[in-house]
Amino acid sequence: MNATKSTALSRLTGGAVGLLAPFFVFLLLFWAVPLFKGVLLSLESDTLYGDSHFVGLQHYWELLRDSRYWRSVLNTTVYTLATVVVSIGLALLLAHGIARCYPRIQGPVSFALMIPGLCPPTVLALLFLLVFHGREGLINQWIVHPLGFDTVNWLSDPDFILSAIVIQAVWRWTGFMTFFLLCALRARPKEVLDAATMDGVNPWQRFHRITLPLIAPTLTFCIIYLVIDCFAQFAGSYVLFGGSGGANDAGLLLVTYAYQTAFVGGGFGSGAAVSLSIVPWLAGMLLLFFLAPRYVKKGALG
């Protein structure tokens, strides 16, 4: 009997390994190997073809004195914070609104909101050229001018360039985040909500004490998704500003700066160092979003 169980267990383990093997092979080929080569490249001189020599951490030390690099870090941080806060806030409002709609229109409305996220980023960026383009841009014609304000040069005024990138990201991902949060709202136990209503809990307390903890895993997924996308965002910024950071580098992001350094300036070692330096900033941003709610809650209770 034990021998039979052992044989069955070994077969099950072998089958699991066989099913997982293709995943790990592709992970090794398309993630681990390029990452290893990128680390090596960042430790060598700025040469892609021909002879190169080992320079150690020189490229990383140079980044510490590079004002454009720190500008790209600041821009990426502001862009990420603004995109996450605005997108998640709007998604929560839209998800609650859709949940209260007539059931038969919830599906079409949810799908309509998801359409921007289904568009390739390059296509979406081309569409936003029409939205931001000078005096005739859609935002100026439909919002800015009717409100009595002067024309906003979204793609050339340093005060508004980063806002344009944030608007593009919010437009793209708010619908998707709404869909995820709507699914989380529908998964709430009805008996818990009914009990809270019978106990006289007001809407804000019901959201803060019941709904928010129940949808916390979905919120966490949405935040992680948005943060990673913001740090990897390239196509939209590239189409809007032609691979530059706009006037006064107002829209220069970390990924854009890595592209400029490597493929425009020819500094492939320096470009690899910029790309790898994104990892600690990305990890720090994720840690910030995880720890901030705990400190806010602790301060409120204290």
Image (cartoon, rainbow, N blue to C red):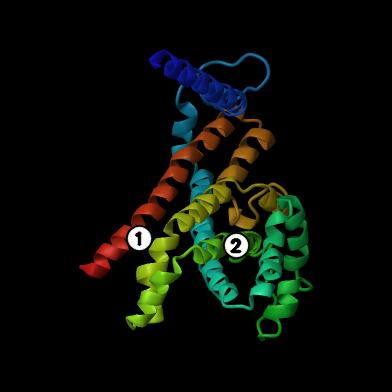
The residue at 70%/76% (across/down) is 151
User: Is the residue marked by circle 2 packed among few (<14), some (14-19), or many (20+) residues within 10 Å?
Assistant: many
Q: Quadrant of residue 94?
A: bottom right
Residue indicated by mark 1: 293
Q: Position of residue 135 (x, y in %)?
A: 76, 73
Q: Specify the farthest residue to the front.
A: 1
Q: Position of residue 76 (x, y in %)?
A: 53, 52
The amino acid sitting under disc 2 is Phe
Residue closest to the eye, 231 or 202: 202
Q: Position of residue 214 (x, y in %)?
A: 41, 62
The Cα atoms of the two marked residues, 1 and 2, are separated by 23 Å
Q: Quadrant of residue 32?
A: top right
Would residue 166 appear left or right of 195 to someone viewing this image? right
Dot 1 lies on which element? helix
Residue indicated by mark 2: 179
Dot 2 lies on which element? helix
Q: Is residue 215 visible?
A: yes
